[in-house]
Image: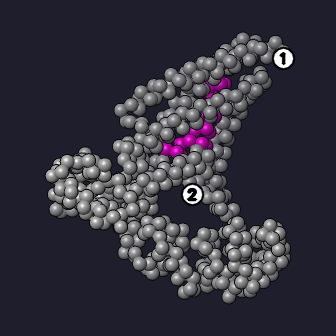
Amino acid sequence: MSGTDLAERLTWEREPASEPLEANDETLRMVRQMIKAGERASLVELLKRWDPVDSMQLLVRLRLKQARKLFQWLPANPSIKVIAELRTEFRSLLMEEATLEQFRDILAGLDPEDATEMLNDFPDDMAEELASRLPDVEEISSRQSYADDSAGRIMARKFVALPETLTIDEAVTQIRADAHRIRKVFTVYVLDDQHHLTGTVELGKLLLAPQGATLCDIMNKDFLTVSADMDQEEVLRLARKRDMRTVPVVDSEGHLIGRVTPKQLTRIASEEASEDMLLMSGVSSEAKADDTIFRIVRGRLPWLLAGLIGASIAATVVGSFEEQLAKAAILAAFIPVTMSMAGNAGLQASAVALQGLASGTLWSGEIGYRLFKELLAALFNGLVAGIILAGLTVAASLIVPISHPIHLAIATSLSLLCVTTIAAMVGATIPIALDKLGIDPAMATGVFITSSNDVLGVLVFFFMATTFYLG
């Protein structure tokens, strides 16, 4: 049977909590036969494409001996995700000694920082059991003592550090002697006799330095350090601001204990960008593509309810102008235009503010100037949009009968000017304010700014309509 035919026949329908489905019986029978026949490669390749929840349900339906054998066949990914979906009682049955040793061998072949990151995907009880079996147990335990997303959790503990009294020749000789232990070196860290970090030397500068000079003579004394407890996002921001390839991590007494590598800085940037994108879309930052239905609902429903509250407030505002709408039903046609412009203007301004905050290019001293530029740009955008809308309104009056088209054009264009300006200022200001309060500014975008600007937009629109069109 070809791989395509096998994939078509071996399918799984998601089962309710306590009710096996007859539709899965054929798949179950075929999987049992493949396990008995030792067709490991074909079965593993198939299960890699399955959702972890479906794989978990398959394991539970198998006899324990077969479930253990299949679980041992699975590579680290997706088996770790399958474990996370298992109920505690089934997990304990699968976690026999051979399985734990299988994972121990996988983790033992990784660097401590990578092993720690993978252990985060295991349930807590199993992570503790596995960590105790690893050769780098002390370092891994030390990493796990730091908070998630902190510099201490992600830092590399391998670095080149030399005494400041060494000459250039002595330093180069020592680096060459340890070349077999060094993967890549960009920066040499310089320590005093108390092992405090006193300076840094770039490798190129070290090689070009004059003979007879010491590391103390050529080292850079204006360097940046971070604490092990610092959030990784702040580490990335400081590294970008100072254009640093690696960032040294020190303890409370100034002793060098690690460094955040270029690889980690790139990973942090990718993670933070993905998190901000999710938050801006009104999705929990912990959302993943393989989440269960319950996790999807739990992560998205609060944001949807927040949007529902905002939309309900906007609807209430519209309803409060029922009398004005009864006088001129044409006003209803412009409400979506106003709300859309308000939402778009707010999101544009907030996206720029977020980018500045994330990259560290938004300095405290220039916040006022940035907001002033946003104000001028919003006024210009609103003016252009208002003129275009006024022209379209007058043009439409030549085709469709509209009462007092000039007055309507003035009211709609002025409302668009005001709405665009207000929305842009709200969108630019809220992320900065939340950042000052220590709250993730990405939470200001999406649902919250859109909803608030919808309400403001409707209020401004009806005020202008009442003043210039119905007054």
Q: Is residue 167 magenta?
A: no
| Quarter of the view holding residue 448 | top right
Magenta-drawn segment = 441-462
Location of residue 340 (image quadrant) = top right
The percent position of residue 307, horizontal first and vertical second, equals 64, 44
Residue under numbered circle 2: 286
Amino acid bearing label 2 = Glu
So how many labels did they put on this image? 2
Mark 2 element type? loop
Residue at 29% x, 58% y is 250
Q: Quadrant of residue 381?
A: top right
The spot of residue 450 in percent (x, y) is 61, 38
Q: Amino acid at mark 1?
A: Val
Query: Residue 436: where, in percent of width, then height?
Result: 41, 42
Q: Main secondary structure of the magenta part?
A: helix
Identified at 37% across, 36% down, the residue is 364
Residue 457 belongs to magenta span: yes
Q: Is residue 379 visible?
A: yes
Residue 25 is left or right of residue 425, and the answer is right
Residue sitting nearer the eye, 245 or 463? 245
Q: Which residue is at a point 75% across and 85% down the rendered structure image?
A: 37
The N terminus: image quadrant: bottom right
- Nearer the observer, 307 or 204: 204
Answer above or below: position of 273 versus 184: above
74 vs 234: above or below: below
Badge 1, how many Cα within 10 Å: few under 14, some, many 20+? Answer: few
Q: Which residue is mark 1?
A: 400
Which percent across, then down, holds residue 90?
A: 63, 81
Q: How far is disc 2 from disc 1 in space, using C-alphas?
A: 51 Å
